[in-house]
Image (cartoon, grey):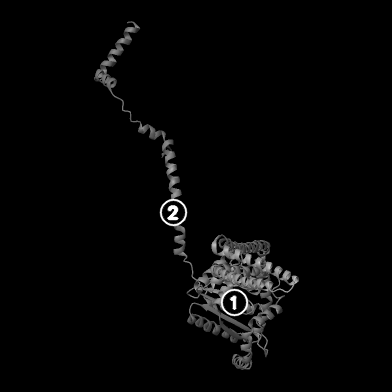
Amino acid sequence: MKRKNILNRLKLELENSLPDSANIINKVKNAKVEKDLSPVYDAINSVNGTMVLNTKYNIAYIAGLMCLTMLLFTMLLILLPIFNAILYPEKNIVTKFGIDINPSIDLMLDENDQVVWALAKNKHAELLLCGENLEGEHVKDATNKIIKLAARAGYFSTKTESDITNAVMLSAVSETEEKQNFLLDSIKSDVKNFYMNNQIYGVVLTEFDSKQELVDLVCCLDYDLTDEQKIALQNESIKNLNHKLTESYTQLKRRFRTDFILEEFNNKLNPINEQFNSETTSIKTKLTETENKLNNFESVWLAEIEICKQKIAEWTAQIAALQEAIKFALNVEEVGRLNAELEIKKAFLTSEEEELENREQGSAMFNAEKDKLINLVNDYKNQIKQKHQQRLSSIENILGQIKGPFGTLYNKLENRKLEILKNGDKQFAEHLSHLQNYNEFYNNYSDWLINSAEQIPTIQLNWNEIKQNWEQQYLNFVQF
């Protein structure tokens, strides 16, 4: 059997052995292919079992995320101040409490008598408060800390002297007198207890700060205020003044990054302010005079018309008298003299008549004179404004010059404070180690107060002068 026949026979046997082979082949040939390629794409777009987005959908997904992020960020910016106000509500300052030893410190208090911020008003106070955080403390605790620091720094004499060398001036200004009395009485008692517990001979003076004290302090911190704004501050409430004071202080602290030394600041500004005041005083005087003329212009104008009429009547009468005198002149010389005087009077009369005609008949002269006064007023105001701008420019230059040294001031203050406290602690500790019997000291202290009582009104009356003497005495004490 040939090879070809053998292969054909095997083929037939194989086909016959397959069940319904013809039907299967036909079904395969006629079967429709489904075009659902999702499983294929899922397999292609997956990496290690993680789906990978198609490029088209990937871009849309990223854009959506970016929009959502920007939306959330915008909402955060809008809601952040609200959340901050809820979580950290702004404390309203309702009281200014002053502690004056030689360091002069103002504690700004909220409605709960807690310290919002402490203002160092001179070098001594700046030195004493360096590194101290009184914010959030009750005024009694803050005062006790200040008194103890002053004792450690050597501001209290531990010697027994017949004259009063140790004095603390407490002052308060608040919305109600009841609040002021309560604070002064409470803290005055604490300071007295400090004297007795540490066996120091001293007195406590109290006074109410006037509203003008706050006004002056605001003006001192906010050098950009005009004279009109300073005057307007006197009509503000205590609460508003405290708010303005806080704003001004905050701006200065941001600028100098430390509690600002008012004494140094004022020393730099005083020459500029004196020059500004001297230059603007004369301008303001002229401005006031011109404004008064402008405000009363119509009445002055009418009065000047009456003056013109009076002069015309006067010149007319004198001319008539001269003409009559010429008729009875005895010689040529007298006639010539009278004629010359007559011509002068006629010239005066003509001038006054023209003046009256211009004033009565036309408004050109009226408007011209009024415009002249208006221009003068505006000119004087512009001069004052220019002087004010020059002053502000000079102040900005000085602030730039002194800002550098203030940048390194904190470290100097800190080192100087540590040095002073180290020496003062040694002396104060030695004093405390030699305290006498408490009852004996109490009796001596009471007698000392009685003997020194007559000095107290004088000290309170001349407090500023006494402080200046102390400043001179302690000049080298806080040198840095």
Is residue 302 rendered to the left or right of residue 26?
right
- Is 400 rendered above or below residue 335? above
| Disc 1 residue type (three-letter) | Ile
Q: Position of residue 164 (x, y in %)?
A: 65, 87
Residue 75 disc label:
2
x and y, in percent, of residue 464 in the image: 64, 80
Residue sitting at x 61%, y 62%: 379
Indicate the amino acid at tag 2. Answer: Met
Quarter where residue 22 is shown = top left
Q: Which residue is at the front of the view, 127 or 169? A: 169
Q: Percent x, y for residue 363?
A: 54, 61
Q: Residues within 10 Å of mark 2 (few under 14, many from 20)?
A: few
Identify whether 46 is placed above or below 230: above
Pair 2/1: label in front: 2
Quadrant of the rendered image containing residue 212: bottom right
The numbered mark at residue 146 is 1
Q: Dividing the image into 4 quarters, which one contains the C terminus? A: bottom right
* Mark closer to the chain start, 2 or 1: 2
Q: Depth check: give the residue in front, 181 or 413.
A: 181
Q: Quadrant of residue 53?
A: top left
Residue at 59% in and 77% down: 146
Q: Is residue 113 shown left or right of residue 421?
A: left
Disc 1 crowd, CA 10 A, few/some/many (<14, 14-19, 20+):
many
